[in-house]
Amino acid sequence: MTVAAVVDRVASGTWSDFGCEVNALPPAELFDRYERSRFLYPAKRARLAPYWPLILENWQRARRAGELLHWVASHEEPGGGWASLTSWRSTHAGWQTQHLVSSGTLAGGRAVMLAAQAVRMAERRDVAAQNWFSPSNRFAALAFGTIGRSLGPEHSLVAPGDYVMVPLALARALRPDGSAGSVAELDGGACPELAELARRCRGAVYARAEGLDRDDLRLADVDRLYRLVGLRRHRRIWVLYDASGAVRAAALAYRGPLGFNFSFLENRCDVLIAPGLDATETRRATDALLAAARHAYADFEPAAVPLTTATPADHLILAGAEPVRPYTRALWLAEAYPDLYRHIDELYAQRLRGRGVYPRSNA
């Protein structure tokens, strides 16, 4: 199927075209299905238990805003099979798609995945979307880890990294001596130096997908939308300057409704370190930024900084930080939505013909 054929096929782009509904399942029922499918397995449920009432309330509040902030696509089959997919607004026009869960139905998984792309294409309001997955999840790695070949590097990015929970007590104990450079928090305006650092570290797709090439770096406009239902979504950014005044590293502290992602990625602190820094410089830059960014997490319920990084954090782990898991981030721009639709359609066609791995739930 050509890109033009995809666009023509999904021109109307409604959920019902694919046998799906949106926001039809109340969060409590959805979470119950998550548990029965073992996507929400006992160890993860126990980890979330202290925050469960707040997580449920956050999802319920988001549901009041319809598809403006957070949507859940679901597909029901006559025999009782079902599948669901969720997505929430991460930046001004960027969405984080996650939690592909099914009760063993290939057709249902295909329906929610394709419907999601069709509706986003029809609305023509997005800049980008992203998905985070564990490299050990074979289906997610196949579906999203290969998009560089299907969508092209000019429209997509696959970026591996690590996810580490740094206790606030540890972050407070960091005492940067200034040898790494000076740290300053950015205001809400555009910062071309930050955008350039983002391009050097992760590429142009990342900079654009995260809205680092525009004004309103604090996501104030997004926060206003979340406030409509009593929630918050904002971002604070600290940059590290070297002696010449050049930006050599940055920490992007995202804050959002706890539990939108069951690994708390909605509250991640994304650290960017300029290429070319040696191990000692990288460690000092990370410590200096963490010491500053911890202030964004003073009211974060798990009392930690959820650090996502592409550079080693071994010294933090030795000091008491908790390694959560390796995570790979897949990002794709709206221009590539037709290509992703075709990519997913072809992948499921192979699965339905009985070849390859069976799709498993992904985070």
Image (tube, helix red, strand yellow):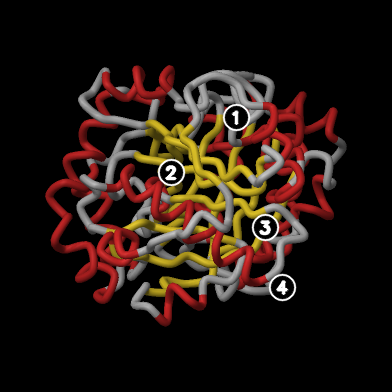
Among numbered discs 1 and 3, the one appearing first in the sequence: 3
The reply to whether residue 353 is visible in this rendering is yes
**How far apart in space, not on screen, are marks 1 and 2 (Cα)?**
14 Å
Identify the residue position indicated by label 3 in the image: 159
**How far apart in space, not on screen, are marks 2 and 4 (Cα)?**
42 Å
Work out which quarter of the rendered image holds the C terminus and state it: bottom left
Among numbered discs 2 and 4, the one appearing first in the sequence: 2
Identify the residue position indicated by label 1 in the image: 211
* Cβ atoms under marks 1 and 2 closer than 8 Å: no
Work out which quarter of the rendered image holds the N terminus and state it: top right
Pick whichever, 20 or 336, lies toward us. 336
Q: Amino acid at mark 2?
A: Ala
Image point (61%, 72%), residue name: 138
Q: Compared with residue 221, is residue 29 higher up or lower down, i.e. above or below?
A: below
Give residue 279's position: percent from left, percent from top: 65, 71
Among numbered discs 4 and 3, the one appearing first in the sequence: 3
Among numbered discs 1 and 2, the one appearing first in the sequence: 1
